[in-house]
Amino acid sequence: MYNINKDLADIFYKMAAIYDFKGETFRARAYERAAHIIEDLPEDIRHYIEEGKLQNIKGIGSGIASKIEEYVKTGKISKYEELKKEIPEDFIELIDFPGIGAKSLKRISEELGITTKDELIEALKDGRVAKLKGFGEKKVENMLKALKMYEIANKRMLLWHALELANHIVDQLKQLKEVNKIEVAGSIRRRKATIGDIDILVSAKDEDRNKIMDYFANLPEVKEVLVKGDKKTSVIIKTNSGRERQVDLRIFRDDEWGAALQYFTGSKQHNVKVRNLAKEKGLKLNEYGVFKVDTNEKIAGKTEEEVYNAIGLPYIVPELREDRGEVEAALEGKLPKLVELSDIKGDMHVHSNWSDGFNSLDEIANFVKNKYNYEYIVITDHSKSQRVAHGLDEERLIKEIEEIRKLNQMLGFDFIKIGSEVDILLDGSLDFSDDVLSKLDFVVASVHSHFNRDNTDRILKAMENPYVNVIGHPTGRLIGIREGYPVDLEAVIKKAKETGTALEINAQPLRMDLDDIWIRRAVDEGVMLTISTDSHNLGSFEYMKQGVWLARRGWATKENILNTRSWEDVKKFVNEKRKKLGGVLVNS
Ligand code: DGT
Ligand code: CA
Ligand code: CA
Ligand code: ZN
């Protein structure tokens, strides 16, 4: 149970979907609400149980509370085990996947006698589903799209979740005194947004290998052992949502550590480049070290730095190892000095319970101020068109501003900056008038509707507004759930440069938007970027870490990131645009 809150939320989402399947809508909504709440709790659910505060959490009634306690005690919820038996086995994984829908599944299953995923895909493709009342071509097309996304989501996991799982395994292996060094390698170490399998490296004495491999193969999370040897062992771990994940453990000697880490961090293409370079110098590079080809003498291997240096390169950080020009840059001494987490001075996209966030302004301000070394946060609640997210109209925005001013007074300085995540409407105009926007410290503008059309025109027009400072999650993608809307990012980057608008690197695990390739383009064009968590709860402020990783994968330095600057300098950025486009300046 490496992340018990998430496990529980997964189960409750599934229970909600099964109740929907059964037609018990009221129950379904209660479980969905509970899942949502648990997912967003800032602390481990066991903490609330220990303090006797489980039922104080709004939305957790006694029935759900007892199921939580059962899960914490036994690792199972008997009601869920019962419910699972009421639907076809294949549907357990599909039933709560976005775009499928428990109710649609039920009708298809009942009216066409379908009970497996393959049968479902067949019936969608051969037109049987389209003929059902209320389905039609469009819906069928969307369901097929969703099933395709499901396959993708099932193949790769999100970085944040993979890292949690990897760290949990590493923590257990560290308990063994025989384990000398241990590190997560592969795509996780390169901080790729999605992860295929987990690669863990250990250094140890030869005679300790078997003990370590035995321990690994017998971890409680392991469901199946694929291969077991004293150099490499691969296992399958099954998560609660029914997904299978592979973990590879490899053991090396201490004097091979750097070479092994270099080799198994990848990427494959980076390694090919580096190996060719070694060859040109009469050297051989493999996972055991760097050797002279003529004499087979080993000249490096203990540390990664030593390995890179031996073939005439400076150390290259894992985030850059994708063969996107990093080896060439290293040879020329032109590697960028990448942005670091400690450079970040504030979060510029945060939601409170004034719109769809979970926490009050007061809770957010105090939590962030205590936990992070920030100079500011920008509260950016939704604007009025976002009805489902309780978007603010002008009147409530003014009330929110008043409360922020009061809180700042109590804090003794303007820690909370006044912002908005204003909707970009269909015609590219904004959900608030210029008069309202001009009174805000910082404005995020985002597209939240019409995901199927090409949205370039809307975004370009929004950037021409003097008060729009950054475009939120520029492509709108949700990894493994929905592709981004069609948008010409080259044009967006050009316009951003022209108008002095920043582009957001949204660090939500499902978003990670812009992605590394487009960050790199923006960096090359000198466009300003922000790294923001888009937090809707206190736990999400931690995502800043992976926002920074993503920025690093896009070769961003401190200078490219707006929120590495003091608020005085952010204000300069805001005023420059206002001046250029004829807006009212913020007081300085
Ligand atoms: P993933 O798991 O799909 O997210 O991506 P990676 O990069 O973690 O790939 P993976 O797990 O297949 O291998 C981990 C690293 O080990 C990879 O980045 C490079 C290295 N590696 C693995 N197998 C080979 C190979 O056959 N040749 C070379 N040159 N490198 C390999
Ligand atoms: Ca891997
Ligand atoms: Ca692997
Ligand atoms: Zn937002």
Image (cartoon, rainbow, N blue to C red):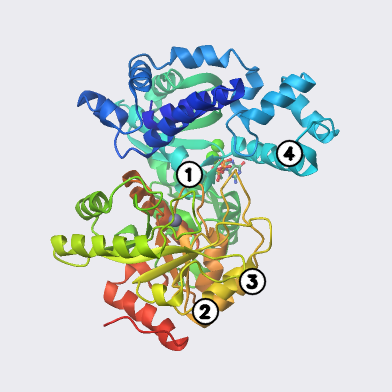
Q: Name the quarter where the C terminus is drawn.
A: bottom left
Q: CA distance from mark 2 to mark 4?
A: 39 Å
Mark 2 and mark 1 lie on one chain; the one further toward the N terminus is: 1
Label 2 amino acid? Answer: Lys
Label 3 amino acid? Answer: Asp
Q: Name the quarter where the N terminus is drawn.
A: top left
Q: CA distance from mark 3 to mark 2?
A: 16 Å
> Quadrant location of ligand 3?
top right
Q: Secondary structure at mark 2?
A: helix
- The answer to whether one can see residue 455 in this image is yes
Q: Secondary structure at mark 3?
A: helix
Q: Is residue 9 left or right of residue 484?
A: left
Q: Secondary structure at mark 1?
A: helix
Q: Are marks 1 and 4 in contact (CB under 8 Å)?
A: no
Q: Secondary structure at mark 4?
A: helix
Query: Label 3 belongs to which residue?
Result: 457
Q: Please state the horizontal and vertical placement of residue 370, each as a whole percent of the image.
A: 19, 52
Q: Quadrant of residue 103?
A: top right
Mark 3 and mark 2 lie on one chain; the one further toward the N terminus is: 3
What mark, if any, has residue 159 been given in the picture? 1
Q: CA distance from mark 2 to mark 1?
A: 30 Å
What mark, if any, has residue 497 been given in the picture? 2
Q: Is residue 241 left or right of residue 584?
A: right
Query: Label 4 belongs to which residue?
Result: 144
Is the residue marked 2 within 8 Å of ligand 4, measured from its CB?
A: no
